[in-house]
Image (cartoon, rainbow, N blue to C red):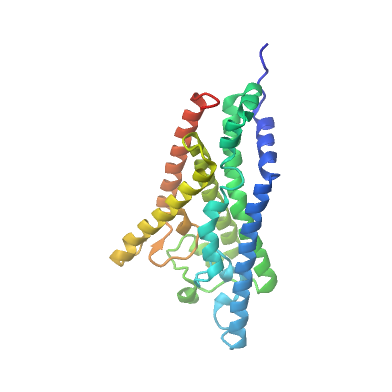
Amino acid sequence: MSVAKTRLWPVLRFELIKCFNSKWMFVALSIGILLALSSAIEATQYVYGLLATHMDYWSNMYSYSNWMVANCNARLSPTIFFYVVPLLVLIPYAWSAITERSNGFDIQVFSRSSKRYVLLSRSITAFCSGFACTAIPLLVNFAVLVLLMPSIPAIYEDWNVLGIFDDSFLSQLFYSAPLLYVAAMTLVDGALMGVWALTVFSLSVFIKNRVMLLTLPYVGLLGWKYFSGQIFTTLLIQGPSLNFIDDMQGTFYWTKTDPLFMGLQVLILLAVAMACFVIMRRRELIS
């Protein structure tokens, strides 16, 4: 007896509920939000320290300048967040395909729905999980800062203490419409980590161990960040950022976010994910 194939939305809804109601999503979001709160506390201590010493004439006293993305004062919490978030976004969902393939759940799903719909739904869910685990902590950090500091736009004359120069990514928005800058950078960072989570999820067609799937791409990203960063620091020149960790931050010194190179990285990851999904679709349910 033939089984009627369901449409995309019921499958997508099932995957989204499964992902966002899981304990692993709670764990990832909790860690991200804790780092966001820590960053806000650290920034607040810095600002009130300036007030206590009567050094309140810099525009890095305000909420927009102390937001995690725009904060260039080399504080610990934002640095930890941007190094850890590529791993956090993998925790809720990236490994799920391995588990469902090994316990036979895939057989039940693919017998009730089109394999194309299932893979597409899981791809969208992987992207959404990465986006949420990045964007929500960033917004929480900004919301706390707005409650604790004045929401006054920075002035360009303070670029030397802010690190957001005239050729920095979206710098015009930062100085002229900072709220739009917060919205734009949140979308950009969330999208970058969504693509990253989607790509790592697709690699489960080759990597059969959950721990290896989470750690190998992350370690590879850290290694590539170090290697690509050394290129310009060794040459003592400023160049484009070649990794997502630097691209997510608004400030730059040796490297800066270049939309062209950032888009190229996204296209490469999407091409890898597409190739993996083509292979995954053609393979047997259990390999």
Give the farthest residue toward the left. 235
The quarter of the picture where residue 2 lies is top right
Point out residue 42 in the picture as x, y percentages from the top left corner: 60, 73
Q: Is residue 1 above or below residue 123?
A: above
The quarter of the picture where residue 16 lies is top right
Task: Tell me which residue sits at (64%, 66%) in the image.
Answer: 37
Q: Pick whichever, 224 or 243, lies toward us.
A: 224
Q: Is residue 227 above or below residue 5?
A: below
Q: Is residue 183 left or right of residue 257?
A: right
Q: Is residue 21 above or below residue 170?
A: above
Q: Pick whichever, 226 or 12, lies toward us.
A: 226
Q: Can residue 99 be seen in this view?
A: yes
Q: In this view, does 177 lie above or below 89?
A: below
Q: Is residue 126 left or right of residue 18?
A: left
Q: Quadrant of the N terminus?
A: top right
Give the farthest residue toward the top. 1
Q: Pick whichever, 263 or 234, lies toward us.
A: 234
Q: Pick whichever, 284 or 184, lies toward us.
A: 284
Task: Tell me which residue sits at (63%, 75%) in the image.
Answer: 44
Task: Tell me which residue sits at (40%, 54%) in the image.
Answer: 223
Q: Can residue 240 be seen in this view?
A: no
Q: In this view, does 206 lie to the left or right of 104?
A: left
Point out residue 111 in the picture as x, y percentages from the top left corner: 64, 21
Q: Is residue 241 left or right of residue 178?
A: left
Point out residue 201 in the picture as x, y percentages from the top left corner: 53, 40
Point out residue 265 in the picture as x, y percentages from the top left corner: 42, 47
The quarter of the picture where residue 142 lies is bottom right
